[in-house]
Image: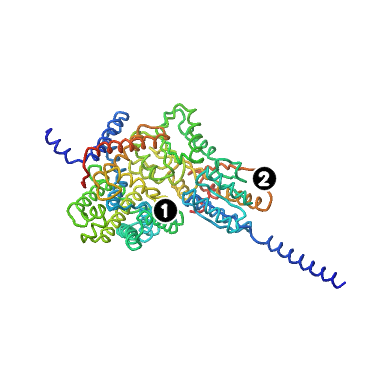
Amino acid sequence: MKMKSGICAVSALAMAIFAGAYQAAAQEPVVIGVSFDKMESFREGEFNAIKAAAAAKGAKIIFQNAQEDAQRQASQIESMIAQGAKAIIAIPWDIEAAVNDANNARSAGVAYVTLDQAPADLKAVDFHVGGDPCADGTAAGEFFAKAAGDKPYKLLELQGGLSNDNGIRRSKCLDEVLAKHSNIVIVAQVPTDWKPEKALVGTENALQAHPDLNAIYSPWNIGLQGVFSVLEKAGKLKKVGERGHIDIVSIDGAPTGCQAVRDGLIDMDLATPVGDMAAAAVDAALAVATGGKPAAPTAFLPGTPYTPADVATQAPKVWGCAAG
Amino acid sequence: MIAAARRMLGTVEPRGAALLGVLVVLVVAFGILSDRFLDYDNMANLLLQSSITGIAAIGLSFVIMTAGIDLSAGSSMNLALVLAISIAGTAGTMEYTTQTNWLVYPVALVAGTALGCLNALAIIFLRLSPLIVTLATLSLYRGIALHLTGGREMLVFGSIREFGRGLIGIGIGYPVVAMFALAALATALLRHVSIGRFVLAVGGSERSARENGIPTGRVLLFAYGFAGITAAVAGLVLVGRVGAVNPDLGWQFEFTVITAVVLGGTSLLGGKGSIRGAIVAAVVLSTISNGLNLIGADPYIYDVIRGCVLLFAVVLDAAAQLHTPATRTV
């Protein structure tokens, strides 16, 4: 009898300990490893959005910056898994290497979500969320087509990185729209590797060859300062609506992009919905880490267009306007 | 006249002649393909675009002449400018803008010198390879700059823009004047000042130089410090031209500069080099981009053309080297 009651007591104690441990485990915040390819203004906006989304869901994050090195990114992801990360949200530097990183993480039972930069194979990851570079390129192309009307129109196309999805598709989809308008001539396509100094030199050279340039496409906001520098030197930095203004469209919605719209220096910026992207990535990471799965395997969110005419009303939707 | 031309060509090394030949071919080809290429304004632009690489290449030539290397040139440039703007900049109207006054120049130069000297001190006192030390500082300096900026792009106004964008009377940019002035100074140092001659001696054989009483440590300190100064000047030009500092500023810049130095005739083994050659090489590199932009080339062939031209220059140089003894022209 004593023995039976002893067994019952031990069992009850064990169950209590197990239940306590389970409860403690349930209350323990899920650790999400966040791995960025690099840090710059746009990434800072994305990081702040992830921090806010994770805090809202009670998750803990650990962060690493790969400084544009795929090998370093792989090591950092392994290290975050060793530190107890149950999910990884990565912005891959190398879209091929991202597939390996995803396979390694998932085989260790860790959820792998990509943000912003799509990996080479979307099936390799649990979830991908990014902007919609094609929709943004198309919107920019449609803006230029409307601005050109039937007039001859010379456009300089600055290009981002030609080895990454955003860079390629922001240009390709712009080109597809412009190809339908025979009056629009792309006078130069300048690869910049997302470097503002290359945007500056490319604009300088294009303006030298075509002083009658009508428009410039800068597929990221950081390229704008180089463009402004050249236009200012040439006496062509005019506000929207002023005589001699060169039409400019950009993408990102960063603080400097928002300021350029507010100053009337660019005609349109397409703000990437950084807050929505970060929230979707965190939701998906937590869902997979706790045994569930995201509602859809991918989400591509088009940018929010805003112009000098509506920047005051659109500002709350633009992450860079709020940050500035 | 022919005799004068022969005398002039006689002072040019075979490697320099090969590089000049490549430049002439490029100028002729782009001149035919684009009716704007040979315009005076474009030539002035071309020199301006070459100036950032050219300025940094002058300093890095000293380092490579000592048989060293500085992989941290781009990071030194970035950190020197971030420090200068943090210390000498005044708050702008918004969180991501700053105003600069004349103080930004001395602070950037002091910061650049200090960063270069730190590289040298680590090489001298820790007896480590320059490759290892500067590989480490490449990451360290960029990391500190990233920490200071918090990853943000900062718009920079004020006096720094005047240096990057100003022109002298004939339409030539201040940075071009700075490049030629620094090249003249560097050439004079190498030819007429003992520390300059010691640079070549240390690069030829550090042990022999030490045995002959040359203070090798001080020579390395001078070479890396000077490279730091030129990296800072190049950074002042770059930030002045772009009008902003961002964490990517100068990323992989060291590879462009090393290419210019080596293509210009400075041996990676040390003891031999050419400041003139480095400047011409910087102009060649800019000519390729400028010409391709002007003719509206397919963006996917830029690297192919650049690679072919560089390969051609190297092959031409190798052919020229076969017929000449080693020299130490500066």
Chain letter of the residue carrying label 2 = A
Circle 2 sits in a helix, a strand or a loop, which is it? loop
Q: Which colour scheme is used?
A: rainbow
Q: Do labels 1 and 2 share a chain?
A: no
Say what amino acid the circle numbered 1 marks.
Met
Q: Which of A45 and A192 is in front in this view?
A: A192
Label placed on residue A295: 2
Q: In the rendered view, would you say B13 is above or below A56?
A: above
Label placed on residue B154: 1
- In x, y percent, where is residue B127? 34, 60
Chain letter of the residue carrying label 1 = B
Say what amino acid the circle numbered 2 marks.
Ala
Q: How crowded is mark 2: few (under 14 residues within 10 Å), some or many (20 or more)?
A: few
Front tag of 1 and 2? 2
- In x, y percent, where is residue B135? 39, 54
- In x, y percent, where is residue B224? 30, 56
Q: Which of A91 and A19 is in front in this view?
A: A19
Q: In which quarter of the image is the N terminus of chain B?
A: top left
Q: How crowded is mark 1: few (under 14 residues within 10 Å), some or many (20 or more)?
A: many
Q: Which of A92 and B298 is in front in this view?
A: A92
On the rendered structure, is A274 left or right of B10? right
Circle 1 sits in a helix, a strand or a loop, which is it? strand
Q: Distance between the residues labelled 1 and 2?
A: 39 Å
